[in-house]
Image (spheres, grey):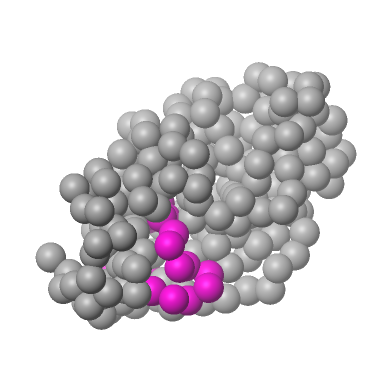
Amino acid sequence: MSEHSSESAAGGFGSLAGSSEAGGIWKGGGGLTNHLLIAMPSLLDPNFSQTVALICEHTDRGALGIVLNKPLPMRLSDVLSQMKLEPSTEDIAAQPVLRGGPVHTDRGFVLHRPGGQWDHTHKVSETIQVTTSRDVLAAMARGEGPGDAFIALGYAGWESGQLEREMRENAWTSMPVDARVVFELPYEERWTGAWRLLGIDVDRLSLVAGHA
């Protein structure tokens, strides 16, 4: 499966803010960029079992995705405190934080709808952006952040040809992004909800069903 990295603190926004590394992680888009990657029921890897990931970029050099449905046992207030920021309301403080994947779990990613001018933003599509700079967190702490924003720590990464091979091996299926899965469905419903959008009752799906 995708490469792994050890868990660590949510310092990614501080280390990325104002650095060339923040922009350099994005190489361009194609292939499955702006698609949802949906784990097949037979995928048992604990990092990815029953996950839905947004593919932020996919090129001949590999792919980068952010898992959308695995909350961490921490809140936005924990991330903000590490950045020496104070949430302006209890609701902001209580916002969940997702585990975006097993790679570079010290890096933070804010997925959000378009809006605002931030130092380091990657445009996934016309409706979804990913920002990695500290300024977006400061705005969120004040209640002035972009619409429908949430934070993920870490990401999933695939080497050149790896994702294509895993799809041939029936580990994943995919579909064009539906913003309802990214921003509206409760986290615990996103995997089954994505299958429903494909017209499939995942509980009845055979573990050895062929990939269409």
Q: In the rendering, at what x and y percent does residue 10 appear? A: 74, 54
> Can I make out residue 167 in this image?
yes
Give left or right: position of 94 versus 71.
Answer: right
The magenta stretch spans residue 23: no
The magenta stretch spans residue 58: yes
Q: In the rendering, at what x and y percent does residue 83 appear? A: 81, 43
In the depicted structure, whether residue 143 falls above or below residue 66: above
Toward which corner of the image does residue 102 lie, by quadrant? bottom right
Toward which corner of the image does residue 146 lie, by quadrant? top right
In the depicted structure, whether residue 8 falls above or below residue 168: above
Task: Give the magenta-colored segment's residue range.
Answer: 43-62
Q: Residue at x 77, y 59 (%)?
A: 9
Q: In the rendering, at what x and y percent does residue 120 appear? A: 57, 41
Of residues 194 and 130, the one drawn nearer to the viewer in this rendering: 194
Looking at the rendered image, the quarter that the N terminus falls into is: bottom left
Give left or right: position of 90 versus 71.
Answer: right
Looking at the rendered image, the quarter that the C terminus falls into is: bottom left
Q: In the rendering, at what x and y percent does residue 173 appear? A: 26, 62
> Can I make out residue 138 in this image?
no
